[in-house]
Amino acid sequence: MTSAISSSAPLSIAITTGEPAGVGPELTAQALAAAGAHWPDARFTVLGDAALLAGRAQAVGIDWSALQGRVEVRHHPLGAPSQPGKLDAANGRYVLALLDAAIDGALAGSFDAIVTAPLQKSTINDAGVPFTGHTEYLAERTQTPHVVMMLAGTGPRPLRVALATTHLPLKDVAAALSIAGIVDTLRIIDHDLRHHFGLPAPRILVTGLNPHAGENGYLGREEIDVIAPALKQANAMGIDARGPYPADTLFQPRYLTEADCVLAMFHDQGLPVLKYATFGEGINVTLGLPIIRTSVDHGTALDLAGTGRAHAGSLIAAIDTAVSMARHRRAA
């Protein structure tokens, strides 16, 4: 459980700077320099190697020292010197140390929310630590049995897409779906959209798994045997969840205009559509955690690291969403 933070204190937001060879360090500097005044009620703790952060900021024309006052750097030393674009397994555990410090601080009540810059899964695994992704690691570290990955755009009526399964091989998806699991996923989405996003009556549209939502069983029975019964149970709990809809026709304005979130059955069913519409300005949110966590919608972009060509729009949106969610939680 998180500890209570005084309602009069500034919001405390932790930012993990992620893979040191990627764009995370410089995007953090760019985001805070470009939009720091946008969050007058927030203070930021940036987790990373202090010399690395100052150097990467300088490389893209930002005076890191000018951000002091509202930004605190919590120094964690690199495992090995880092160059933009060049991965080194010696820094795999460094990246995890940043994430652990943010999670521990949020669980202790020191942080109202955490924002994570992208990391490189392969570097962590090469360092000898089995690692699937941020979402799964956050669930394990917070002892949360069920979390939900949701990506979203920005603006007054953003497209939001949540996932019933996350980083699974496609051949394993059908077996991973269950009535209880989908009901719990819908419960988490409904709860967090109400309490962290300020939506009083969320409407959730749910895709089928198979082409044409199974074509009445001719193209698969998951819609009949699993998804539809889950929707019936969720509706009985007061959750406005509708479907299952064929995924190939659901993502159009006549369906999405009145929807607050789409629940897709697997990673590449819903996210290509969302990323096409929002990439570079979208966010990733982990729902169901006892803490608030947001992130960017992109990876480490090793080819852009250190060039000054990476765009901080997604990180700015992730920070903005974290601050907004923390405000809603504090006001609840």
Image (spheres, helix red, strand yellow):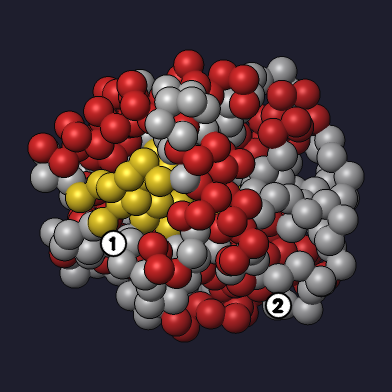
Residue where numbered disc 1 is placed: 197
- Residue at 16% from the left image edge and 62% from the top image edge: 200
Residue 96 x, y percent position in the rendering? 60, 34
Residue where numbered disc 2 is placed: 63
Residue type, mark 1 in image? Phe
Residue 188: name its quadrant: top left
- Residue at 72% from the left image edge and 64% from the top image edge: 26
Element assignment for label 2: loop
Few, some or many residues within 10 Å of mark 1 (<14, 14–19, 20+): some
Residue 296 x, y percent position in the rendering? 58, 56
Q: Which mark lies nearer to you, 1 or 2? A: 1
* Observer able to see residue 236: yes
The answer to whether residue 84 is left or right of residue 156 is: right
Element assignment for label 1: loop
Q: Which corner quadrant holds the N terminus?
A: top left
Task: Out of 226 and 126, give the one closest to the viewer.
Answer: 226
Q: Is residue 202 above or below residue 232?
A: below
Q: Is residue 305 above or below residue 77?
A: below
Q: Is residue 298 above or below residue 8?
A: above
Sooner in the amino-acid sequence: mark 1 or mark 2: 2
Q: Which corner quadrant holds the C terminus?
A: bottom left
User: How far apart are the two marked residues, 1 and 2, measured between alpha carbons?
Assistant: 34 Å
Residue 250 x, y percent position in the rendering? 46, 55
Residue 125 x, y percent position in the rendering? 71, 24
